[in-house]
Amino acid sequence: MQEANFSAVTEFILIGFSTFPHLQLMFFLLFLLMYLFTLLGNLLIMATVWSERGLHTPMYLFLCALSTSEVLYTFAIIPRMLADLLSTHRSISFRACASQMFFSFTPGFTHSFLLTVMGYDRYVAICHPLRYNVLMSPRGCACLVAWSWAGGSVMGLAVTSIIFHLPFCGPNVIHHFFCHVPPLVKLACGDNVSTVAMGVGLVCIATLLGCGLLILLSYAFIVAAILRIPSAEGRHKAFSTCASHLTVVVVHYGFASVIYLKPKGPQSLEGDTLMGITYKVLTPFLSPIVFSLRNKELKEAVKKTFLSKL
């Protein structure tokens, strides 16, 4: 009987923007521009780092990996969301929904791991500068990036497998604009749904908080080391190398905490949709802006590589 229930749902209906019927064209144009800017900004960062030999350092290798994760993350969600804004047929197949969850969670988790690795990179550069070339060797950096992607893939696969092994008995309307865990769990049936939902939630929150605490620990040592620098110019120079990373961390964890750490309670569809937009569209949109504007070396390299040829 449970097997029959499991096969009852073959597709889902995404109704995230159905409560904004008169704003859908405006949302489409706005999100399309933001997506194109996000894509262009991250590709520009990757192309600049690739073409400028002076940027072939661990910090910029990690930045390239971070840009790659953001391109894949937004590609898994936004094109489908844009198509749904122009369509009246918003169904998504069971397999496509599972694929979307996996290909959004994998770069999402990887993004958190890479931000943690970048915090460690800044810690080594400022607190142990004489050992930097040894601790952050090309092979070591490649391993850190590979482990970040491996960890993200394992987490994405685990969450997706757990959610889509739940039985879905009948209702198939997802109150969101993509295949997200909480609205999908509400559609599942069975005795262990609440336990599975709690387990998945704890895994996501523990991963988010674990990475956040490691970053905080790195910056605690960094701040202590910077305060010991005698000159104001030296302190400013040391802190400026961390400014862009720290800003992205604040934006990333600020919006993520709104999504994953919000208190349980009645929440409107409009509220869920707008909160989802902040994390799925706005955060990736802001990242390349922050790294381009707050990183003087990268900004100069972009001007040298591309703008000088115009």
Image: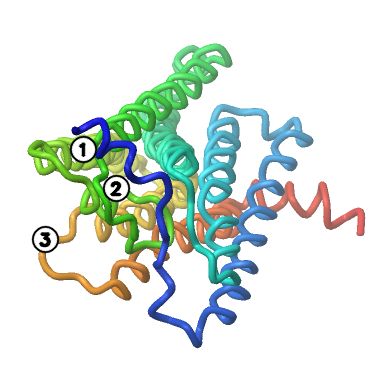
Instruction: Report the mark closest to the observer, 3 or 2.
Output: 2
For marks 3 and 1, give the CA distance.
Answer: 15 Å
Residue carrying label 2:
181
Q: Do the CB atoms of the residues marked 1 and 2 lie less than 8 Å apart?
A: yes
Sequence-earlier tag: 1 or 2:
2
Q: Locate residue 175: give its quadrant.
A: bottom left
- On the question of residue 228 being in view, the answer is no
Q: Specify the quadrant that holds the C terminus.
A: bottom right
Q: CA distance from mark 1 to mark 2?
A: 9 Å
Indicate the position of residue 237 as horizontal and vertical percent values: 49, 47
Residue that mark 1 sits on:
200
> Which of these two is toward me, 111 or 243?
111
Residue 205 vs residue 51: left or right?
left
Q: Viewer-proximal residue, 117 or 78?
A: 78
Q: Which mark is residue 264?
A: 3
Q: CA distance from mark 3 to mark 2?
A: 14 Å
Instruction: Of the two numbered discs 3 and 2 on the same chain, state the one appearing first in sequence.
Output: 2
Per the rendering, the mark at residue 281 is none
Going 69% across and 54% down the picture, which residue do you hit? 40
Residue 17 drawn above or below residue 214: below
Which amino acid lies under the numbered mark 2 shown in the image of this protein? Val
Disc 1 marks a residue whose amino acid type is: Val
Q: Is residue 38 left or right of residue 93?
A: right
Quadrant of the frame with the N terminus? top left
Q: Crowding at label 2, few (<14), some or many (≥20) Cα neighbours within 10 Å?
A: some
- Residue type at numbered disc 3: Lys
| Picture residue at 29% right of the left edge, 50% below the top | 184
